[in-house]
Image: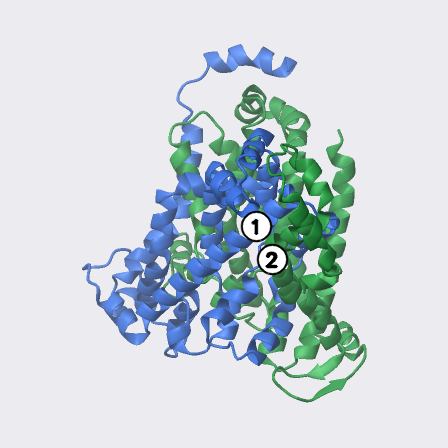
Chain colours: A green, B blue
Amino acid sequence: MTAGTRPAPTPGEVLPATASAAPPARPAPVQRKRRRPYRAWLLFLLFAGPNVALLVIFTYKPLLQSLQYSTLQWNIGSPVARPVGLGNYVDWFTDPTTPRIVTVTVIFTLATVGGGMVIGLLLALLLNRRLKFTGAARTIVVAPYVLSGVAVGLLWLFVFDPNFGVTSALLRMIGVTSPNWYTDPAWALVMIIVVYLWKNVGYVALIYLAALQSVPRDLVEAASIDGAGTLRSFRSIVLPLLGPTTFFLAITTLLTSLQSFDLIHAMTRGGPLGGTTTMMYQIYEEGFRSGRAGYSSAVATILFLALLLMTFVQLKYVDRKVHY
Amino acid sequence: MGIATTHLPTTARRRPTPWGGYLTLLLAVAVMVLPLVWMVLAGFKGRDEIYTSPIQWLPATVDGSNYAQALDTVPFGNFFLNSAITTVIGAGLKMLLGLMTAYALVFLEFPLKKLVFGIVIFALLVPQQIVIIPNYTLVASLGWINTYQGIIVPGLASAFGTFLFRQHFLTLPASILEAAALDGAGHWTRLWRFIVPISAPTIAAVALVSIVGEWNEYLWPLLVVDRAEMMTLPVGLTLLQNNDGVTNWGVLMAATVLVTAPVLIAFFALQKRIVSGLTAGAVTG
């Protein structure tokens, strides 16, 4: 794989290598390197090659293969594949379930990325105050982030149990009948979003907290303790200073949110009635459950292009914003 | 600045105990902790204590029958072993690859260095799910279904780790490497005897984060393993969920405790390092 990156070192490299091995006392390593570039390049390939090869084999090549698969009507493991050109794309854009899946994806992404950043920032401001126990509180707030998504999904599924769960008991206390989180598509989506935020908001808070601690403390304190007057100072002083952090979080949390699989699989399997099927979950469903690997690859390609576009837009937008 | 200095005296004067702040803090902590407490409690509850209305908050007795049943129903020992093996080997090799690549990018000469760095960085933008079908096909054709290499190898490449190590290596003082070069040490020795020891905190932080990632990995092991004895903990956990028509919450919660407890204990023991590993990307990036 790596050999393809560059022509293989020619036999000529052996000569300078052995020649320069004779005077070892010369204290100018830079000069020596220049005199035998091929040897240095080979060393580079030995160090970086395995990793790059793995990236090529398991990331870049499959990316192109996925593009090719998306033009096939094909099932995983099947020896026969029928070329359908752009048929899978046409199918996806005209499928009656597509608008629902796109809507679910957009709602889930906006709620988890946007909601996560707002709640995370508020938490960070709280943890940055001069209070006791903030160190311990920070640790506790981040803890769910390191837990398995499947385990988190299952434990919350029990919390949300419409008959025997905590939420239904609490709602009954205030005289409200619990919605059926398991069978109502809209409430199921709400449930997934809540659990996602519970699990991931600590990470956002942690990153914001690190950024806040590099902002002069008086500025933040003035902003977070006093009332309405300093809300403006927060908006005009602290928030701009957090710009680069917000940018970093926008990109990273968007990527993680779009990749959510564990929670959805553990809690709803994309249901009820497709109410929690995001595009990412659709890729799994079509490819590994419905035997439509070609169609699934088309969805993957569309999602990847959308992701690239969004990242590009974010980079563009922030390029202007960070140079204040 | 003007705002801060005019406000300081006032805030300092009227600053009794900020009860509001503490109340909010308590609320935030409660929201994070109570679901976990609920999980632990449910692990000790019998069926009649779970399927009851009004809700019964505490179990009548603390007995381990749910745990016994969970361990009985599925091969939990295998799950633990498989998770441990794939995590240790996967995270270990990933670190090795990341360190070597970062070393090459910072300290070795190569005309296409920028391209190599680009290949590493752009990979961060490719979600694993986008490429699962071709990767599954490849792994299946190699006969790697239900094997450790099938679980480990496709996710082995290090992109984020390489990026972080490179950032870190760039900050190292040149004098250390000059000393190593004068010492006559080869690059392999320079990496392990000079660079790695002084980078220990960064390496530990990144290692912990990648260990957590490997341990919790779900989608890929779910796809390439269908035999119970080869399953990792998260995959095996969902096995319990499907066992009978109605979910047996007591047993399932006991199993969930078994999966989450080791991570939680490790997290609280090593939280400083893990936290710095999590923030490393944001601070350098």
Letter of the chain that mark 2 sits on in the rendering: A
Label 2 residue SS: helix
Query: Splitting the image into 4 quarters, where does residue B227 fall?
Result: bottom left
Residue at which label 1 appears: B100
Viewed as shown, does residue A124 lie left or right of A13?
left
Q: Nearer the viewer, residue A265 or A13?
A: A13
Q: Identify the residue at horizontal 62%, vertical 76% (top origin).
A: A287
Relative to B234, residue A120 above or below: above
Asked whether disc 2 touches disc 1, contact meaning CB atoms under 8 Å apart, the reply is yes
Q: Identify the residue at horizontal 41%, vertical 67% (top origin).
A: B232
Q: Nearer the viewer, residue B196 or B227?
A: B196
Count neighbours of disc 1 (C-alpha within 10 A) and say few if under 14, some if 14 to 19, many if 20 or more.
many
Q: Is residue B110 visible?
A: yes
Q: Identify the residue at horizontal 43%, vertical 65% (top origin).
A: B234
Residue B142's x, y, as percent? Answer: 56, 78
Q: Are marks 2 and 1 on the same chain?
A: no
Q: Nearer the viewer, residue B194 or B39?
A: B194
Q: Is residue B53 visible?
A: no
Q: Quadrant of the N terminus of chain B?
A: top right
Residue A179's x, y, as percent? Answer: 49, 62
Relative to B51, residue A143 above or below: above
Viewed as shown, does residue A107 lie left or right of A126?
right
Counting every numbered tag in the picture gives: 2
Look at label 1 and name its amino acid. Answer: Met
Count neighbours of disc 2 (C-alpha within 10 A) and say few if under 14, some if 14 to 19, many if 20 or more.
many
Query: Splitting the image into 4 quarters, where does residue B258 fall?
Result: bottom left
Look at label 2 and name its amino acid. Answer: Asn
